[in-house]
Amino acid sequence: MIEQNARVVSVLSATTVQLEVFRQTSCQSCQQGCGANKLAFMNNASVHYLEASTTLSLASGDDVIVAIPEHQLWQAVGWLYVLPLSICVLLALIGQYWAGEGAAILGAVLGFATGCMMSHYLQGHPQLPIVTYKKEKLSP
C-alpha cells in the first residue's frame, strides 16, 4: 500500500469523504537556498482534493492516512503510459516499413492518439483510494 497524509474536507456519504492531500517533495523539506527549493516553493499546486472510500466514522477536519494498493498504481501506469506509447511505436514502425518517413511520423501521431483514446475507454472506473486510519489529535 502507498500511504499519504490527508485531511477530511467534507463527508459526502457514510462511505465516501472528500480529502485534501498536501504534496511535499524532498526539496520542500530542506532549508537550503538552492533553485529546486525555490521552484518548489513557487508552485501553487501543493494541495490536491480527492474522494476516498472509508468505513470509519469521520468528521470535517480529521487528519487521516489515505492509501492505494500498489497494483492499482501499476495498472494506471500501464494504461496511461505503456499502452499509448506501444501503439505509437507500432504504428510508426508499420508506417516506416510501408511508405517511409512521412508515414512513420503520421503513424506515430495517429498511434499515440489512438492509444490515448483506448486507455481512456478501456481503463473503466478507477477504484477510490481507501482511508486506512484516523490520526488521533494530541491534547495540549
Image: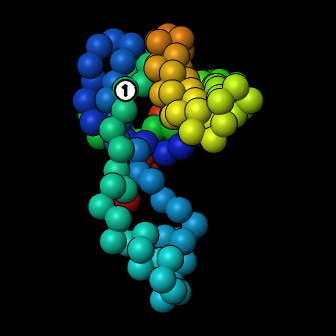
Q: Nearest the camera: 15 or 80?
A: 80
Q: Quadrant of the N terminus?
A: top right
Indicate whether 26 appears above or below 129.
below
In x, y percent, where is residue 6?
43, 42
Q: Nearest the camera: 60 or 25?
A: 25
* Residue at (36% x, 32% y) in the render: 50
Q: Which type of secondary structure does the marked residue at label 1 adopt?
A: strand
Q: Nearest the camera: 88 or 28?
A: 88
Category of crowding for the residue at label 1, using alpha-carbon neighbours closer than 10 angstroms: few (below 14), some (14–19), many (at least 20): some
Judged from this view, the residue extending furthest toward the front is: 99
Q: Quadrant of residue 39?
A: bottom left
**Three-letter code, disc 1:** Glu
> How many numbered marks are there?
1
Question: Horizontal placement of 100 versus 49: left or right?
Answer: right
* Residue at (30% x, 61% y) in the render: 44
Question: Horizontal placement of 20 versus 125: left or right?
Answer: left
Residue 88, can we see it? Answer: no
**Residue tagged by mark 1?**
51
In x, y percent, where is residue 83?
63, 25
In x, y percent, where is residue 33?
48, 89
Residue 41, can we see it? Answer: yes
